[in-house]
Amino acid sequence: MLAYVIRRVFHSIVVLLAVGLVAFSMFRFVGDPIDNMLGQERTQADIDRLRTQLGLDQPFAIQYWKFLSGAAEGNFGVSYRQGRPVSDIISERAPATLELAAVSGLFAILLGIGLGVFTAIRRNGIASNLIMTLSLVGVSLPTFLIGILLIYVFSVELDMLPSFGRGETVMVGYWSTGFLTKSGLVALILPAITLGLYQMTLIMRLVRSEMLEVLRQDYIRFARARGLRERVVNFRHALKNTLVPVITVTGLQLGSIIAFAIITETVFQWPGVGLLFINAIHFVDIPVMAAYLMLISVMFVTINLVVDLLYFAIDPRLRVDGRST
Amino acid sequence: MTIPVLSVRGLVVEIPTRHGVMRPVDGMTFDIKAGEILGLVGESGAGKSMTGNAVIGLLDPPARIAEGEIYLNGDRIDRLRLADLRKRRGKDIGMVFQDPLTSLNPLLPIGDQLTETILEHLPVSMSEAKTRAVAALEEVGIPAAAERIGAYPHEFSGGMRQRVVIALALSAEPSLIIADEPTTALDVSVQAQITALLKRLCRERGAGVMLVTHDMGVIAETADRVAVMYAGQLVELGFVRQVLSEPCHPYTDGLMGSTPQASKGQTRLRQIPGSMPRLGNLPPGCAFSPRCSYVQDKCRQKPELRLNSCDSRTACWFPIGAPA
Amino acid sequence: MTDSARQTQVTAPSSEPSRLKTVWESDFGYAFRRSPVALVSCLVVLFLVLSAVMAPWIAPHDPFNPVTLNLMNGFTPPSTPNAFTGDSFWLGTDDQGRDVFSTILFGMRISLFVGFSAVLFAMILGVTLGLIAGYAGGWIETLIMRVADVQLTFPAILVAMLIFGIAKGFTPVEYRDQMAIWVLILAIGLSDWVQFARVVRGATLVEKNKEYVQAARLIGRSGGAIMLRHILPNVLSPVLVIATISLALAIIAEATLSFLGVGAPPTQPSLGTLIRIGQGFLFSGEWWILLFPSVTLLSLALSVNLLGDWLRDALNPRLR
């Protein structure tokens, strides 16, 4: 078990180093950082000074190392476009994205598992078939179209919910939250549904197929033969076994939610990190792009690691296998 | 006369398919008395397990009971609503499945699976249920039961797991136990232990047992009476000693001939020519007639189960050993 | 009946129609005829692809020729004569007086071009790398598959955005709009090769040890020839399935990037760009500028997706 954890952590570090190399190469080779930072009126002295200041005259490996240690401390340099430290810009905007992702993730997991179980238990019901057909359409729909559709129905036609922004926010320490005001909560609804819908559909379809598989197992028959209530059979026996494989995919989906937030944030003009990233691509603001890449990698790698370790908590068989290997 | 634990009358199970309606069980009639072990034998596909599943109401749709009656301790149970039938499962009817590796939920400790069953059926407290769970494990011969109550199924060997399964099936003290090939998936060395255990527990509790198996050896060892099935139909029913030593139906005779018997010192096993017909195209009349070496014209008509001279019931026009 | 069958065989032993007929009458063809979903989605895809290809001939207007544009025609509702000019357009016009129907036809052309090219690129890259990884083994395989693993950790759309951003950084500012389409193809293609490589590598590992490949090696065939002549034909069927599913994903990816403003430029609008433009008129009431491109994209994505799903089930149930 310990050996396994160490191997997984090592693997994660390798992935991060690889991504770091990509991010650093972007810095170093895409465009000329000197060009990007100095205006038209510059002297050779300015250029030389900046070159030394940025360490561009040093060997590649040392520059890479400096970049990594800088990144580890949260120092990603200065945005070409805004002229402010990237870390400041990102920490300003992170709460918006994280709150949106958290609400969407919760929505996707709860509804996905709920509907998945429902459609598996009532396999041949009318409601189940309807949900399954709709989910097929849901998987094929591009996220931004869902967002536009929701805006059209709930903002334009019904005029019930706001179509952009995050409403009023309150500062709690360094964290600007939309959870504490009514307008903040209302503003969350449409973006959260848009962002969570695709992941919800995936989780639902997965839960359904896994659950149908589990319901065919002998121990479910045996549980029925022992006269246990359907509720106990479905939720205590079947659901727990269903969740083991579901956890991996769900974990990875949570990572995707943060990445897909880029699209939702654009549709709803949500002032988060995703919108920042899209604008960075637009204006080729390399430091912001690199920082976003590093942050999201750390997030993905951490989620992957946690998902792997969660297996041990849920499946007792693995604990034994881990011990024996 | 006392009421039998289980009484099955003219049971027919049907499966509608694209090629017409199949009848994997066709007109089964038998009784099981308290404390009695009835062996149900036949080749795979003969409808043995299907009969067991029909009794406990666990037929997989689209299979369904089409005709017949099932009585448990005198109460008719084949027409019960699912919720009422469920209350009887586990409490009145216990079931042991073939493969102990897959019968237990891998993610729940065995103690939890025991207590949930006990709490479902008996009016006892949680701590009382735990005591009973330990007792049930001790009874089936699990060493150090009190310490192993929190263990997961994968921490037990195959034979031990089947003991756990039996403990689970018996935990609410049912009066009827359906054991569906309980030893088939086990090592030969463990098989005898499990059969002996099953036999002892039923004798002690006076429960009736329906022992489904294809193994004549297990029947000879364990059962009191035996019912032989062929293509969904009951072909012979009688006391084990009687049927095994003097089989009346040609199929039973063939089945005995193809089973190795160390004591008789046979040199070569006999085979029954051909194979069991598919359910879709049963021959008219006696289903065994195409493979029977005693077949005559009359076998085109369907034989009824009748008492014959050799003191068992046989569905055959020309039972072996009967005066011609 | 048998006579006529023999006749067609005699008259046209290997010509195209008879080969089509064999496919049509095979199990595959039977499954196709029996599935209404496959039939309908195939028809929709064919219809859309055909209209996109024919766009320059069937489009009533040339929306990108400033000479034919009349700003006075701006915001004409569908099938209603314009208040000033009296011109009527089937699906209306956008803010600059461009015919929506024509822009959709040309937009679809770009969407499909990018989609097909990106998948083709991903396929060639993925199949090549997968063959090499599976056949060569050793550190080459480790390197290729590790890169694939790392890339697979991230959603394809994110990878595509990043590649788009980097490639844009390398392109001189004055060429950025011109190059955007090619950069898009590169970005989407690079984000999608992993699936191909994994499947091909897996199949190659299996095929590599079969007798016929061993035999080919024994008679002195080179590694490249063995891969092309012997292994490649055996992995084509799963590759075809992945390609169809990838096409749906690529079309959606292109639309998404263009919608986000990091894809096809307004001078060469794809369906995604048109939707981006149309979203601006969501609140002002010119619904047709947004609705029609959206519906087109939706039918395109949905039908390709359904076709891919069906193809996967029909060709290889194990991939499910």
Image (tube, helix red, strand yellow):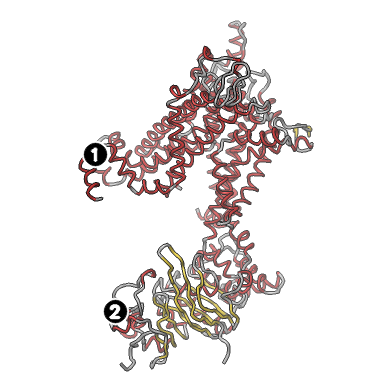
Front residue (pair C59, A116): C59
Local packing at callout 1 (Cα closer than 10 Å; few below 14, some 14-19, many 20+) is few
- Measure how far apart labels 2 and 1 are at the Cα level: 57 Å
Location of residue C240 (image quadrant)? top left
Is residue B226 visible in the rendered structure shown here? Answer: yes
Is residue C146 visible in the rendered structure shown here? Answer: no
Left or right side of B250 for B194:
right
Of tags 2 and 1, the one toward the viewer is 1
Give, as a three-letter code, the residue at label 1: Ser
Q: Is residue A292 above or below residue B97?
A: above
Can you identify the residue that label 1 sits on? C14
Q: Is residue C317 above or below residue C112?
A: below
Location of residue B263 (image quadrant)? bottom left
Badge 1: chain ID: C
Give, as a three-letter code, the residue at label 2: Arg
Q: Residue at x 65, y 20 (%)?
A: A78
Front residue (pair A273, B323): B323
Local packing at callout 2 (Cα closer than 10 Å; few below 14, some 14-19, many 20+) is some
Q: Secondary structure at mark 2?
A: loop
* Residue B270: mark in rendering: 2
Measured as percent of width and height from the top left, residue C47 is found at: 44, 33
Q: Residue at x 50, y 15 (%)?
A: C65
